[in-house]
Amino acid sequence: MLYGKEDREEAEYLEPIFGSECEDVDLPKYKLNKESMEPRIAYQLVQDEMLDEGNARLNLATFCQTYMEPEAVKLMSQTLEKNAIDKSEYPRTTEIENRCVNMIADLWHASSQEKFMGTSTIGSSEACMLGGMAMKFSWRKRAKKLGLDVQAKKPNLVISSGYQVCWEKFCVYWDVEMREVPMDKDHMSINLDTVMDYVDEYTIGIVGILGITYTGRYDNIKGLNDLVEAYNKKTDYKVYIHVDAASGGFYAPFIEPELVWDFQLNNVISINASGHKYGLVYPGVGWVLWRDQHYLPEELIFNVSYLGGEMPTMAINFSHSAAQLIGQYYNFVRYGFDGYQAIHQRTHDVAVYLAKAIEETGLFEIINDGSQLPLVCYKLKEDADREWTLYDLSDRLLMKGWQVPAYPLPKDLDQLVIQRLVVRADFGMNMAYDYVQDMQQAIDDLNKAHLVYHQKKEVKTYGFTH
Ligand SMILES: *Cc1c(COP(=O)(O)O)cnc(C)c1O
């Protein structure tokens, strides 16, 4: 039925949305509204604002976890109000953090001959910042002792060009020169033939990556350790390795326990990982550990009060909720080693299945087949008979709700545009079947359609995160 203007007003009055007239306000965008509103309506309005947003479970761009068990969520919502920095007030939470550090140290083979130290962080970015600062301070001490003029040149950090942006931030914030070891088609992780050419007496450390965010490949940390070992034998200016294991740190120990990449290697002095990646916690929690307190300069340790005494902390942030820490501990308690292994194994199998199915289309060349980190990346074959690009395919997949990024690889490889699927714990085989079907459909549609395509030669980043 059509209403005249008057009738419409009548209808609005009789049939208010959500059973209330209170909904009839403009949502504040630039300044606070004058009047308050009922919680029920505020909840509904804010929720509605996000209706057309992406569905996190279908977001194949991110490593960050998009599912936790209801029991974990309950625990975490019950602990949101606790401030993790208030060690005296919440000594149990402090104890829980320490237990997590102990378990992670064990997972990464910290030696009982040394005194490991570690802390939780908001994520790997804060963890890398702390790891980098410790390297810079330790280097300066060592270098001064050896009589080097530490002001004469900027200190430098050596890392492959597949680094995550947090290292660029680190170098800018702490005034360190970033020395990128370029990746190329034959070296899709750190190039061991050239890496040591970038090292000199101003090098604060070398970062190895487990694995590279763009492709999921692991740097050969053991090989790097051998090179460093040989280098250190010949010089007084020792250099050490920090492993950025943001995504591999909670994955490799379960899926490739024989892979040697951690504190078993002499020159690996610190490691970070994201609890919210394959540690299976919602964002944000991360971890950084040093193999021995010797590598963590005292200047970086600050004391906070703890049970009438003091306790050392090293963190950039001060206040934050303890909920994520508790979520991490819940997962450790709940899953144990076998549980993590089973979850990761399934994720791995899904990634391998996806890689096979995508290869079978005949259109794509697989760049990462899920054999290391559980992610699949691929590029269009040079001779693939089609007019569309990976950007068009991303668009098409988005129509079904899937968020699949397409982006160029870093420097020197940036003519190579790839698409990447990150498989997480909540992406099971059934979803994978659905995805493959939708992808096939998207390809068929693109092949048949007369569409306006993205610029063919354009190199751009499209939905790439973490
Ligand atoms: C994700 C990632 C980071 C940043 O981690 P956050 O936990 O998101 O801060 C750093 N390094 C690598 C290799 C990563 O994959």
Image (cartoon, rainbow, N blue to C red):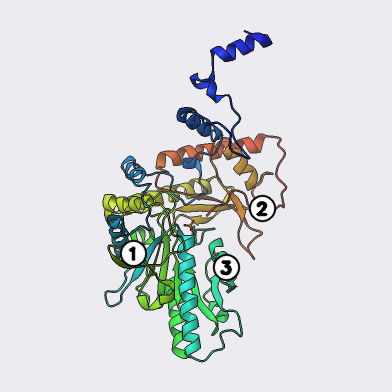
- Which residue is depicted at the point 50% across and 31% down? 42
Label 2 residue SS: loop
Q: Position of residue 370 (x, y in %)?
A: 45, 54
Looking at this rendering, what residue extends furthest in the bottom direction?
A: 147
Amino acid type of disc 1? Ser
Q: Which residue is mark 2?
A: 460
Q: Nearer the viewer, mark 1 or mark 3?
A: 1
Q: Which residue is mark 3?
A: 173
Reply above or below: 66 against 110.
Answer: above
Q: Quadrant of the N terminus?
A: top right
Tell me where residue 368 appears, x and y as whole percent. 50, 56
Residue at point 37%, 70% (across, down): 260
Q: Residues within 10 Å of mark 3 (few under 14, many from 20)?
A: few
Residue 264 pos. (x, y %): 34, 73
Q: Amino acid at mark 3?
A: Tyr
Identify which residue, 178 or 216, lies in the foreground.
Answer: 178
